[in-house]
Image (cartoon, rainbow, N blue to C red):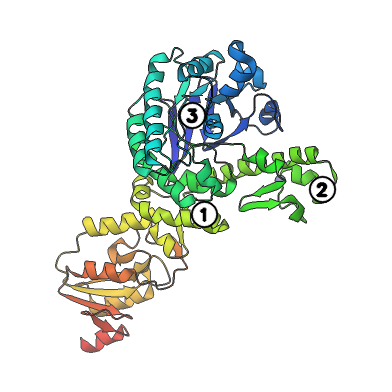
Amino acid sequence: MCFEIKERDLAGKIGILKTRRGNIETPYVMPVVNPIRNIIKPSELKSEFKLNMIITNSYIIFKHYGKEAKDVHEITGFDGIIMTDSGAYQLLVYGKIDVSNKEILEFQEKIKSDIGVILDIPTGGIIDRKNAEYTVMETLRRAKESISLRKDNTMLWAGPIQGGRFLDLIEMCAEKMGELDFHIHPLGSPTQIMENYDYSTLVDMIVIAKRKLPPERPFHLFGAGHPMMLSLAVALGCDLFDSAAYALFAKDGRYMTQNGTIRIENLKELPCCCPICNKYDIKYLMEINKNEREVLLAKHNLYVVIEEIKIIKEAIREGRLWELLEMRCRSHPRLYEGFKKILKYSKYLEEQDPIISKRGIFFYDYLSMNRPEVIRYKNRLEERYEKPENKEVLLLLPMPKSKPFNKSKIFKKAIKIVGENVHICFYGDPFGIIPSELAETFPLSQFESSLENIGIWKEDVKKFAKNYKEVIILGEKINGFKSIKNIDELKVKE
Ligand SMILES: [Zn+2]
């Protein structure tokens, strides 16, 4: 097993990817290194940025050095873990490359790549279904072919998932690819979708592929490296990323932040404390020549990406990935659209999310109501909960301000008036109904909420109330139930 999962939150995880050159903790963003020329030297990625894994392109090495190329670690000057892409990207961009699947596989083994990729056929932005089908079938054929061609069994191999916008093709590709002997599964060619900020489609693509793949294999999102969207991708189950964005953005004078990108000439201040932004100011950056500026910008951009991965890991450890998502996804309306797409997959997230959370949870608005904890609680209440015997009258109290609810003043007063034979429960969002005897179980007294009265709880009340002969509700009106304004009304009637 080359991947060990250490911590989980939502479908996100911290894992250890084991390679023959050492281990990497995921989630991890591999900087894309050009084998010939780089803004930041690969050796500096290790010494300055403490990065122990990069991705480079075996096809470019093949074209440049020919079949007699040396060890890729020597060529790049990077002695950490190296993943090599196969040239599929060049195929996507130029439409044609002059190497076969067999040749590039053997070549990756020869140059001692630690993780290789088969020569898949990217679906990219193809909109014609017949052509999209071809890319999937041919990718699968090559994947099968690759297994018999492998000679070095210490190397790890990646089997990409194609299908593009055709979600049923992604599903089929993931199912068939998952049956084959691969160690990592990248999601192929989402670049165009990300360039168009189509995060909503991206969410579909990731979840649909992930659901069909073996859960113990790490999932790699090709070409995704903007810090703004990493938390969303991690929360859906992506473990590995690769990105040239830090350098491409720098070339174009764009300064990355966790919430988006700013053109350097529009900045009056460098809103960051990385070693670059600490050492230089904006005035200096604008004065130096373009090439020097590009290097410094690329370094800053890479620092921001690395910082965001650290923030995400801490959020996973703390069980706060959802909260981080809520913040980051507000950086851009299209990203927020992607976040809202999660509602469609709340069951998937609930299945992946660990049952024990360490800390209390926060609710901001109706989107927070789709947290796995809420979905899980409501399902369990409906499917497994049995009301206490002999209590045929249900008294519903609004959720008190103080927690746990069964220690609140209103509860104590109510139980004094109605006695032990009435079942007292609390109503309100986000949890709908909380039976008083469960009020102290997680997370029913470990949450903070700024939700207004959204009223989703009313549906939960209607379902829950079926098991009682009489229902009395304090403070609200629901057709068919007796409503009281003040708890003392019960006393008068007694
Ligand atoms: Zn900085």
Q: Nearer the viewer, residue 340 or 14?
A: 340
Q: Nearer the viewer, residue 45 or 148?
A: 148
Instruction: Tell me whether circle 1 and circle 2 mark residues in contact (CB < 8 Å).
Output: no
Instruction: Tell me whether circle 3 and circle 2 mark residues in contact (CB < 8 Å).
Output: no
| Quarter occupied by residue 373 | bottom left
> Callout 3: few (<14), some (14-19), or many (20+) C-alpha neighbours within 10 Å?
many
Identify the residue position indicated by label 1 in the image: 335
> Callout 1: few (<14), some (14-19), or many (20+) C-alpha neighbours within 10 Å?
many
Identify the residue position indicated by label 2 in the image: 286
Against 332, residue 304 (above or below) is above
Quote the CA–CA distance across marks 1 and 2: 31 Å
Q: Position of residue 475 (x, y in %)?
A: 33, 81
The residue under label 2 is which amino acid type? Met
The residue under label 3 is which amino acid type? Leu
Tell me which label, 1 or 2, sits earlier in the chain.
2
Is the CB of mark 2 within 8 Å of ligand 1? no
Tell me which label, 3 or 2, sits earlier in the chain.
3
| Quarter occupied by residue 457 | bottom left
Quadrant placement of the N terminus? top left
Mark 3 or mark 2, whichever is nearer to me: 2
Identify the residue position indicated by label 3 in the image: 17
Is the CB of mark 3 within 8 Å of ligand 1? no
Q: Position of residue 490 (x, y in %)?
A: 25, 84
Q: Residue at x 28, y 63 (%)?
A: 437
Helix, strand or loop for disc 2: helix
Helix, strand or loop for disc 1: helix
